[in-house]
Image (tube, rainbow, N blue to C red):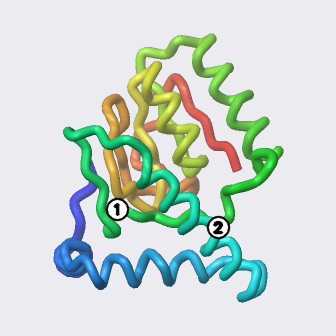
Amino acid sequence: MYVPDADTASRNKVKEKLKSVALFKYAVVMARAFRVSPGFLSRARRLASYLKDWKSYNSLEKNPGYKTAVTDLFPRIHDKTGSHEIDPVYFIQGCWCAEKVFKAKPAKHYDVASQALMVGIIAQFAPTTMVDIRPLSISVPGLSFVKGDITHLPFKDGEIASLSSIC
């Protein structure tokens, strides 16, 4: 199991404190919306469209048990498209790998440095240990993390019966 070092723990504590400051959180969210291509005018139009949609959503009949606030906004201004934009290589190889693991039904599966989304999905069907140099910032049932890389795996020879390493 991954345990953050003192510097990482300290940075995470500062991040959590800053997230509780509504104005700062809102400024960061808006800044992130402008960090991605295309040009500034296109991003400004997309942000205006997003805010119009949010205003429209906010005018719908309210559920008294659910409240929204400006600090809940997370503008994904590049997501309003006519189709999903996906990387076909990652998508197809992730589907292929997951199918192989699901059919094999291993008691335990290990993955080295593959796409985190694919590993998280596999973990819902077989207990999975993800090996990577970068720890995940979240946890899900069935998924554990071990720090390592493909050239220095933290396992004994013959210990692993089911292994993937996509990418």
Q: Name the residue type under label 1.
A: Asp
Left or right position of 9 against 137: left
* Residue 161 appears in view: yes
Residue at horizontal 68 percent and vertical 71 percent from the top: 46
Query: In what element is the residue under mark 2?
Result: helix
Query: In what element is the residue under mark 1?
Result: helix
Judging by the rendered image, the residue that carries numbered circle 1 is 72
Judging by the rendered image, the residue that carries numbered circle 2 is 49
Q: Name the residue type under label 2.
A: Ser
Q: CA distance from mark 2 to mark 1?
A: 17 Å
Up-down relation of residue 121 to residue 13 (above or below): above
Position in image of residue 143 (x %, y %): 37, 36
Among the two numbered marks 2 and 1 on one chain, the one whose residue lies closer to the N terminus: 2
Residue at horizontal 34 percent and vertical 38 percent from the top: 140
Residue lying at the far bottom in this picture: please name it: 40
Position in image of residue 94 (x %, y %): 68, 36
Q: Neighbour class for label 2 at 10 Å: few (<14), some, many (≥20)?
A: some
Position in image of residue 13 (x %, y %): 17, 74
Left or right position of 139 against 57: left
Residue at horizontal 57 percent and vertical 53 percent from the top: 150
Position in image of residue 34 (x %, y %): 60, 82
67 vs 27, nearest the viewer: 67
Residue 3 figure quarter: bottom left
**Total residue callouts:** 2
Residue 61 figure quarter: top left
161 vs 14, nearest the viewer: 14
83 vs 109, nearest the viewer: 83
